[in-house]
């Protein structure tokens, strides 16, 4: 029996997957080479099956029944379905809204148009040192204006971050005991004031590195322990707005962060999602590593948010620190092409993982970007990089559902689409109606729409519709009989 080329290739890959892990454990240069080859094979498999995973878990079936004024099913009605918003959260930080001297209304129009065309999610800056630089004098009004702008554009918002050891106002009390009281007030007042406006909160940011910092918040976290501090902060936020979705966010993706989250749960603390930062100023992460991070944290059975994604369109730098800001970090043509290629794969991988719920790009443009890095989807002049076009093609075309369906005799039309908000347009014989529905994961997604000012005519009796076909068949049979009779007569003659 001869093997097909595809079978041979699959067999070789299967052998590699089985043999390479044990060989890689032997160490040395050969071990490193084998480990790299093994992980490259894994990465290929992960991306190869991403489309199947996306189809299976990001989409669902919907059934729409169209009825007339009397509740009678409408036959042969056209149902045009058009997705309006993704259930999945695609976003970026909204910091530029705070930089305009006249508020969100003065933000650069090209920036705003590009953002709205691509994203449905945004992160607002609630850093304590800028939100309340003077005790009891907050930027509540400005942040609410920013939130109103986002909401008016159908953008879901998150607040970042309520507690962070690197964002401490100069008036903060030095003692841990006083800090406990002040932080509780800070969290409760802010979350309560924005309840129903801000849907998500990074309650504690980077807790794994908070305790060692010698400042008022770091000293408080050190005294309480990071897990206790996080548990308390989560409880404060939840009591202020029970419907808010609360995250613990960190740049650590290793066992230390996982241990911290487990310790929070042991203390009966409850987080609703996990924030994973992925700032890549020092170079892109291998995609198999990104998948492994998702697998590491999926067992908490809460959504994973990739909360700060930075992918460069210039050369990476390893020596730059958190507080450094470079003025000469250019975006290059080659870097932009590489950024687009990696960003497409990175988003595809995350969108295909069942635990990931949100991806937040950081920053949206190179203008004012953190560390001065060329990490934006837009250049400093707000022109679009290839990565922007790549993500737009994915988010708004490949992962976007638009089409037509038609009702049968039961008035029912079915379609399959990505989970999210939809506009339905129903048309029949000049009558038209629109309806908004939400295609949700885990629900039956059965909807009914009434076509107003229309009455479905009764179905035509069977013989009335079928007689032309019956008559045609009879003519054919009769013609065949006559031809056969004529042939027999001729043979007798």
Image (cartoon, rainbow, N blue to C red):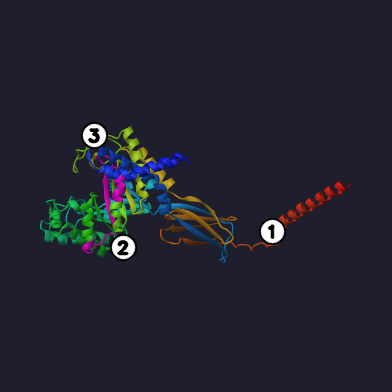
- Nearest the viewer among 45 and 77 is 45
The CA span between labels 1 and 2 is 58 Å
Q: In this view, does 448 lie above or below 255?
A: below
Q: Name the residue under label 1.
A: 465
**Residue 368 % position (x, y):** 26, 41
Q: Mark 3 points at which residue?
A: 328
Q: Is residue 23 magenta?
A: no
The CA span between labels 3 and 2 is 44 Å
Q: What stretch is highlighted in magenta?
A: 265-294
Q: Which residue lies furthest to the right in this view?
A: 493
Q: What element carries label 1?
A: helix
Residue drawn at 43 percent across, 61 percent down: 443
**Residue 15 % position (x, y):** 35, 43
Q: Residue furthest bottom?
A: 70
The CA span between labels 3 and 1 is 78 Å
- Nearest the viewer among 231 and 133 is 231
The tally of labels here is 3
Give the label on residue 243, or none: 2
Q: Is residue 68 above or below residue 360?
A: below
Q: In this view, does 176 lie to the left or right of 14?
A: left
Give the label on residue 123, or none: none
**Residue 54 % position (x, y):** 40, 50
* Quarter holding residue 39: top left
Residue drawn at 11 percent across, 51 percent down: 214
Label 3 vs 1, first from the N-terminus? 3
One can see residue 121 in this view: yes
Q: Is mark 2 on a helix, strand or loop?
A: loop
**Label 3 Cα neighbours within 10 Å, binned few <14 / some 14-19 / many ≥20:** few
In this view, the mark in front (1 or 2): 1
Label 3 vs 2, first from the N-terminus? 2
Q: Does the magenta stretch include residue 279?
A: yes
In this view, the mark in front (3 or 1): 1
């Amino acid at each position: 029996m001869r093997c097909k080329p595809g079978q041979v290739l699959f067999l070789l890959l299967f052998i590699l997957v089985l043999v390479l892990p044990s060989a890689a454990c032997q160490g040395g240069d050969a071990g490193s080479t084998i480990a790299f080859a093994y992980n490259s094979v894994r990465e290929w498999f992960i991306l190869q099956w991403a489309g199947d995973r996306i189809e299976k878990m990001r989409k669902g079936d919907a059934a729409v029944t169209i009825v007339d004024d009397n509740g009678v099913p409408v036959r042969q009605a056209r149902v045009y379905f058009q997705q309006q918003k993704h259930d999945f959260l695609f976003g970026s930080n909204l910091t530029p809204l705070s930089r305009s001297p006249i508020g969100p209304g003065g933000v650069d129009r090209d920036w705003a148009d590009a953002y709205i065309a691509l994203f449905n999610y945004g992160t607002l800056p609630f850093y304590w040192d800028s939100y309340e630089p003077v005790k009891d004098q907050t930027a509540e009004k400005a942040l609410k204006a920013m939130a109103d702008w986002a909401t008016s554009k159908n953008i879901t918002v998150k607040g970042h971050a309520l507690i962070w050891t690197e964002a401490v106002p100069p008036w903060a009390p030095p003692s841990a005991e006083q800090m406990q009281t002040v932080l509780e007030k800070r969290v409760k007042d802010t979350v309560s004031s924005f309840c129903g406006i801000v849907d998500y909160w990074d309650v504690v940011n980077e807790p794994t590195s908070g305790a060692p910092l010698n400042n008022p918040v770091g000293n408080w976290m050190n005294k309480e322990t990071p897990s206790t501090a996080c548990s308390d902060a989560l409880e404060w936020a939840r009591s202020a707005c029970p419907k808010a979705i609360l995250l613990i966010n960190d740049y650590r993706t290793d066992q230390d962060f996982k241990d911290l989250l487990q310790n929070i749960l042991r203390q009966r603390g409850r987080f609703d999602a996990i924030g994973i930062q992925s700032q890549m100023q020092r170079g892109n992460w291998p995609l198999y590593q990104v998948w492994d991070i998702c697998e590491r944290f999926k067992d908490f059975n809460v959504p994973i948010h990739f909360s700060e994604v930075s992918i460069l369109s210039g050369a990476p730098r390893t020596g730059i620190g958190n507080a450094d800001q470079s003025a000469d970090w250019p975006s290059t043509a080659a870097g932009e092409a590489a950024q687009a290629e990696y960003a497409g794969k990175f988003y595809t991988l995350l969108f295909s993982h069942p635990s990931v719920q949100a991806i937040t790009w950081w920053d949206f443009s190179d203008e004012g970007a953190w560390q001065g890095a060329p990490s934006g989807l837009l250049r400093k002049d707000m022109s679009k990089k290839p990565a922007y076009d790549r993500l737009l093609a994915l988010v708004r075309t490949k992962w976007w559902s638009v089409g037509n369906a038609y009702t049968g005799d039961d008035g029912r039309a079915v379609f399959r689409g990505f989970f999210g908000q939809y506009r339905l347009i129903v048309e029949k014989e000049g009558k038209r109606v629109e309806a908004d529905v939400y295609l949700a994961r885990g629900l039956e997604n059965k909807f009914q729409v009434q076509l107003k000012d229309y009455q479905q005519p009764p179905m035509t009796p069977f013989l009335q519709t079928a007689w032309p076909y019956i008559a045609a068949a009879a003519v054919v049979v009769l013609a065949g009989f006559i031809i056969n009779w004529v042939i027999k007569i001729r043979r007798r003659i």
